[in-house]
Image: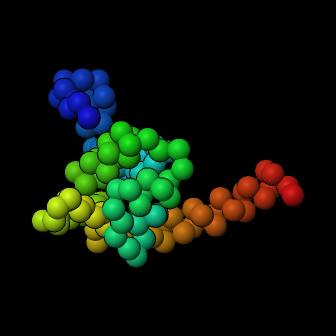
Amino acid sequence: MAKRKMTSTNSINREKLNDLCGMEYAIDLLGGRWKLLILYKLENRALRFIELKKILPGITDRMLTLQLRELEKDGLLHRTVYPEVPPRVEYRLTDSAEKLIPVWKALERWGDAHREVQLPG
């Protein structure tokens, strides 16, 4: 991923939002289609890139790489590289990310209930 310029509008907005309140900060870290889903799939286990790719339908290699890098940079993922040939890399949740488990479980329950209302069987 190309690094954002510190003077870019995106970087400036991120700084301003992060200073406002915890909600904006959390949404900035977890926003987007894939981040929370990646964390959810790593609950109670470590997975390799190819394993994540298989269980995240529709994500491209590039997008998964970008999201994993951002989650690691933001302190939500541990990346472990094993000195093997070929190299083996595993991803797992940090302690901070594990504190989100009740949040995504609540979102999952809400999503199931809302889907039933919106898409009656």
- Outermost residue, top direction? 8
Residue nearer the viewer, 108 or 46: 46
Q: Which of 51 and 66 is in front in this view?
A: 51
Position of the C terminus by quadrant: bottom right
Q: On screen, 116 above or below 9?
A: below
Q: Which residue is drawn at 31% across and 67% down?
A: 92
Residue reaching furthest to the right: 121
Residue 60 in picture, x, y percent from top left: 43, 41
Q: Indicate the quadrant where residue 9 lies.
A: top left
- Compare residues 121 and 56 and report the one nearer the observer: 56
Residue 2 left/right relative to 115? left
| Number of disc labels | 0
Q: Residue at x 65, y 62 (%)?
A: 110
Residue 116 shown left or right of residue 10 in the figure: right
Side of 39 relative to 78 (left or right)? right
The residue lying at 46 percent from left, 64 percent from top is 41
Task: Report x, y in % for residue 21.
Answer: 35, 49
Considering every residue shown, the one lying at the far bottom of the view is 44
Q: Quadrant of residue 61?
A: top left
